[in-house]
Image: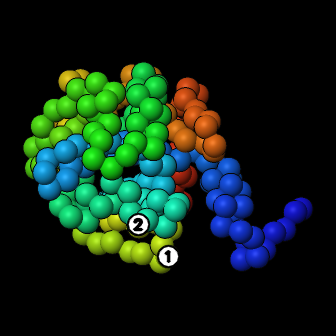
Amino acid sequence: MTWLDLTRLAPMERYKLLTAVVIPRPVAWVTTQDRAGLVNAAPFSFFNLFGQDPALVILGLEHHRDGSGPKDTARNIAETGEFVVNIVTPDLVGPMVASAAAYPAGVSEPGVLGLALSPSGRVAPPRIADAPAAIECRLLDRLRYSDERDIVVGEAVGLAAREGLIDTGRMHVDWAGAFPVARLFADRYARLEEIARHPIPRLTGET
């Protein structure tokens, strides 16, 4: 067994190790807009759902590595208090990865990449029209433990889904085999193809 003292490693070494161990991770393709209405889109894999009452979505948003402060997504969320998490399926990996390029501030990734946008129901930032599902969020809290990134806590206030994805009578979701992609590490992503069921056993006397 190999043991490493993470506190003695350089931050980038910790990042490389932990992101290669904590896999797979869901991908949040986040759309925001600035006060002038310019729409930004960027993907993040420091992301997950953390509750249902309230429904909490948490993002880890990296700052510029040159020390110049938050990137567009973190700045827009701080200024407007709203964002949309678009869910990425395999057909969207190309444009999602392209939107991660280091575009200058003031450049709209959807505009450059020709991404169609659709209006949201409860927040101002639009969703990516081709995304099968989009979670509309309002900012609840921001945490900053260093100049490296912001931890953003949002409340999910709306959900848009493509036709047929959600059975609203039973509140069931059917991905029909086209599951969202997962981030692994570096430039590697995974498709969810083999799904197994493992029900939790019921104990004697459990109700």
- Residue 35 spot, x, y in % from top left: 14, 56
Q: Which of marks 2 and 1 is in front?
A: 2
Mark 2 or mark 1: name the one nearer the start of the chain: 2
Q: Can residue 132 be seen in this view?
A: no
Instruction: Name the disc covering residue 146, or none.
Output: 1
- Badge 2 element: loop
Residue drawn at x 66%, y 67% is 11
Task: Tell me which corner region of the image, top left, top right, bottom left or bottom right, holds residue 184.
Answer: top right
Quarter of the figure with the C terminus: bottom left
Vertical arrangement, residue 149 with respect to residue 19, above or below: below
Q: Residue lying farthest right?
A: 1
- Quote the CA–CA distance across marks 2 and 1: 11 Å
8 relative position to 71: left or right: right
Instruction: Name the disc covering residue 69, or none.
Output: 2
Along the line of sight, the residue nearer the viewer: 112 or 85: 112
Q: Is residue 9 visible?
A: yes
Q: Are marks 2 and 1 in contact (CB under 8 Å)?
A: no
Colour logic: rainbow
Q: Callout 1, which amino acid? A: Ser
Residue drawn at x 33%, y 27% is 113
Residue drawn at x 10%, y 43% is 121
Along the line of sight, the residue nearer the viewer: 94 or 156: 94
- Residue 77 spot, x, y in % from top left: 26, 60
- Residue 54 spot, x, y in % from top left: 24, 65
13 relative position to 105: left or right: right
